[in-house]
Image (tube, rainbow, N blue to C red):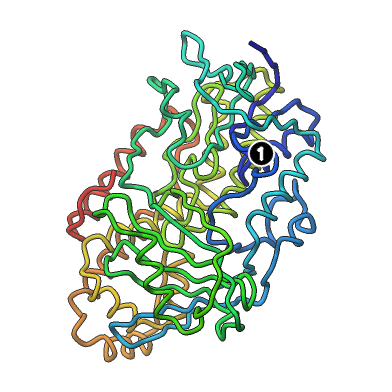
Amino acid sequence: MSIDEYDVVVAGAGTAGCYAATTIANEGLDVVILERKDETEAGHIACGDALKGADAFPEAIPKERLEPAFTNTGVDHGRFEIPKEDTVLEIPVPGELAVIDRWEYGRRIIEAAADAGVDFHYDTVINDVVQTDGGRVTGLKASRRGDRATYEADIVIDGAGSLSLLQDKADFEGTTFDTNVRYSQFCSAYREIVEVPEPVEWDDALVFKPTDRAAGYLWYFPRTATEINAGLGFQMNEEPMKLVEALKRDLRDRPEFEGAEVRDKLGAALPTRRPYDSAVAPGYMAVGDAAGHVNPTTGGGIAGAAYAGKYAGEQAIKAVSDGDVSEENLWRYNTRVMDHFGGRYAGLDVYNVLSTAIDVDDLMGLLASLPGEKLAEALYEGSTSMSFGLKLKAAVKSFGYWGTIRNFYRTKSLADELLAHYESYPTSPAAMANWTRERDAIMDRIYETTGADAKY
């Protein structure tokens, strides 16, 4: 059995893991990424391929290293197809947006990390988390190309994705690390890369379409005018759906896909929940999907993962330098995530809660009656407002859905209250219990108002 010693060990060569490791290596620390796939498959990850805000990504991996993976930079809006309302909503998407080749993007960030001095151990399956009697994480046990290996480190960064095995193996008793995690807070997704014979008319849009259940949707994202990422996702707490058949049925009904060829198939799980209340424990930080760093209404997780990696990497550098990897000394990672996007994502999750308690036809009817630019604000910012004129216009269009709208606005007020509460996220673990108690009281009122079952 081999024993490898590093300052930091990172689990997973995804966006969060590569940005964390590159940030650390740029400061001269020894860091290794453990990746279960082989070198040729690393970076091949199921994804919708939509990348938002790359112009503002962390500088650890410069944008020019990513740009060769950008296959369509002409996308500027979302196209919501609502067949039961015979309506198509064109909704502007704020900020820079691109559709990417996710595998090529994965290769690019791995190459950038390697150039920064990060070691990569491929074909490495993590089996266990090593902890002291006091609970501090000190490393990982793994199988590397079939041989047992132990990795010792000051800090372990968990970028192992949704429902990370590391969190099943670690003992977080006595820490603030969020263990209130279950399958119902996650989505199953499946996507195919489809080559169509003729250019599609909507190559400047991200296309969404509801399934017959409120918690499911189809998507069509154009990598190019003839190469489409076609996929479907649904909440894990829903009754089983035949994902592939539901997608293929819709593909057969769309004339632009006649004669299409499927190039690649892949499935995955992703969080559709608020970010973890705390993603740190002594010697341990979770990043990206492993910490719920995904926009719960759109499923977009690349940007959040990149910044989570940056913040975790910078905090790891400080902790190693201080010789102090305590929960207290890692805590600023939590506060930076919450200040940047975590609170906003928690507010957006309220609308996921609401959707589980609304009839799908009523929900689609309501969406069809709302102004597109205000829907965009709600989807990406977590809150929105309307002038009197817009309210009046929406009221006329939404006659018949006023009960649903009343419920929506009551919920919106509570979502705004929740957002405000996240602005006072605690600056140390000692204040966490009181903050959580107050947050849960707001959530109880959200469940009461929406009629939804408790999600957490």
Query: At which x and y percent is residue 203?
Result: 59, 79
273 above or below 358? Answer: above
Query: At which x and y percent is residue 17?
Result: 63, 39
Query: At which x and y percent is residue 281?
Result: 49, 26
Looking at the image, residue 288 sits to the left or right of residue 153; the answer is: left
Looking at the image, residue 16 sits to the left or right of residue 81; the answer is: right
The residue indicated by pointer 1 is 20
Q: Residue at x 50, y 48 (%)?
A: 293
**Label 1 crowd bin: few (<14), some (14–19), many (20+), radius 10 Å:** many
Q: Residue at x 36, y 53 (%)?
A: 418
Determine the image quadrant of residue 71.
bottom right
Q: Nearer the viewer, residue 275 or 191?
A: 191
Q: Amino acid at mark 1?
A: Ala
- In the rendered image, the residue lying farthest to the top is 133
Q: Residue at x 63, y 10 (%)?
A: 1
Q: Nearer the viewer, residue 131 or 419?
A: 131
Q: Which structural element holds mark 1?
A: helix
Query: At which x and y percent is residue 197?
Result: 60, 80
